[in-house]
Amino acid sequence: MKLDTAPKIRRDRGQRERAILVGVQLPGEPTSYRAPLEELSDLADTAGADTLDRIVQRRETPDPRTFMGKGKAEEVGRRLKELDADLVIFDHDLSPSQARNLEKVVGGRVIDRTELILDIFVRRASSAMARAQVELAQMEYSLPRLKRLWTHLNREVGTAKAGIGVRGPGEKQIETDRRLVRKRIRDLKRSLETMQAHRVRQTRARGRYFTAALVGYTNAGKSTLLRALTGADVLIEDRLFATLDTTTRAWEISPGRRIFLSDTVGFIRDLPHHLVSSFLATLEEARFADLLIHVVDAADPDVLDHIDVVDRTLYEIGAGGVPRIHVLNQVDRVQDTLTLRLLEERLPEGLKTSALEGTGISALRDKVHEYVTRRHVDVVIEGDPGNGRLLSQLREWGEVREVTYPDSVVRVDVRIAPRYLARIENAGGRVIEDGTAPADD
């Protein structure tokens, strides 16, 4: 069952919406509001809207009724009419009453940052799990806002096409109510529990292999890097949240040595809490990974702030303690050398790469290979020379360095993770010589 929980406006097919961006600068926030509204403009562009104007107000505290001052809100309303804009996008989360009051003052549709991001996720989700997670997030967001949405529906019944913030979940059933929404939330949660349990089993099943996950701020170039490293045929687009689904591919870091590498959904400042909770399963790859590869866009002027956002989000999802390698990606696009120097001071061991040009790819592969192998121990395994399964398993689990056949046995010198030692006997082998202890991380 689909539920209609958002207003509609009439748009011609293929026509982009026209938006005015609004921000309120509060004490303690950056003195320049350019960067946040620049990101909001990028989000609006991804959602299908052109930015016509940007309006910022400085306030000591948000207005409890309209977040921004009433006089400034009236100014926004005048600009909305002058520019014939379709909607106002707030770079903050608005309470249901604040959104209703603002719409009365400006005389047009108002959406907040969360609603904009949810709209993008609606359009970008492709797998069954991602679609269910996004719909659940929208339902939980919409539940306290049904009164406002009913007002829109009564005014816009019969319109041809929904606009930003009004796509799904459910555009067929007009008269929704809290009971139906709550029932849908329960159904989605039950369905997601089943899908999440399956995803966790898949993730943990790869536990016998070394796993790494690409993490980073949205549009940092993770998918491009995944393609450069593994040859994966993944969507690459210069937009925020180009993909929401986790992609995992085998990556050969040395001849005969493969690990699993996953590309995760990008992080963003002020990620709606509904999405953080809904996407925990999608981020299981990061939580259970042996190593995180934090991809940083070295060409982004706000890169240092983005690093902080990623660090906070990783701790929020329980992945803060996973070992990390930092990659300074897209160095070919760097124009501000000062920012790059500050970035190098912040991450002195960061590897410089350009996924598009292939710069630094070999160095990154070597770095990961070094990390993988120094977590292993050197042992000598002995077994029946006719046991092809034993040698095959050892090549899969570790790095076979030498194979000899003394005294009618096969003897294998292998570098292997300690967790596999318990499986050697089941494979028909026995440890005859222990190596050194694994190096500390």
Image (tube, grey):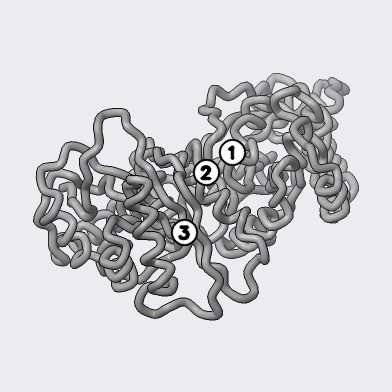
- Residue at 15 percent of width and 47 percent of height: 1
Q: Is disc 3 surrounded by few (<14), some (14 to 19) or many (20+) residues within 10 Å?
A: many
Secondary structure beneath dot 2 equals helix
| Camera sees residue 390 | no
Residue placed at 67% from the left, 66% from the top?
A: 31
Q: Label 2 neighbourhood size at 10 Å, few (<14), some (14-19), many (20+)?
A: some
Measured from the top left, where is residue 408 in percent x and y?
A: 81, 21
In the displayed structure image, the side of residue 375 where residue 159 appears, left or right = left
Q: Are marks 3 and 2 in contact (CB under 8 Å)?
A: no
Residue assigned mark 1:
262
Q: Residue at x 69, y 52 (%)?
A: 302
User: What amino acid type is highlighted by mark number 1?
Assistant: Ser
> Which of the 4 image quadrants contains residue 178?
bottom left
Q: Which residue is mark 3?
A: 22
Residue type, mark 3 in image: Val
Q: Quadrant of residue 101?
A: bottom left
User: Does 186 sit above or below residue 240?
Assistant: below
The circle drawn on residue 42 is 2
Q: Nearer the viewer, residue 407 or 35?
A: 35
Of labels 1 and 3, earlier in sequence is: 3
Q: What whole-number distance in Å separates the C-alpha atoms at marks 1 and 2?
A: 25 Å
Residue 419: x and y in percent read 70, 48
Query: What amino acid is at disc 2?
Result: Asp
Q: Is residue 194 left or right of residue 213?
A: left
Q: How many marks?
A: 3
- Mark 3 or 2 closer to N-term? 3
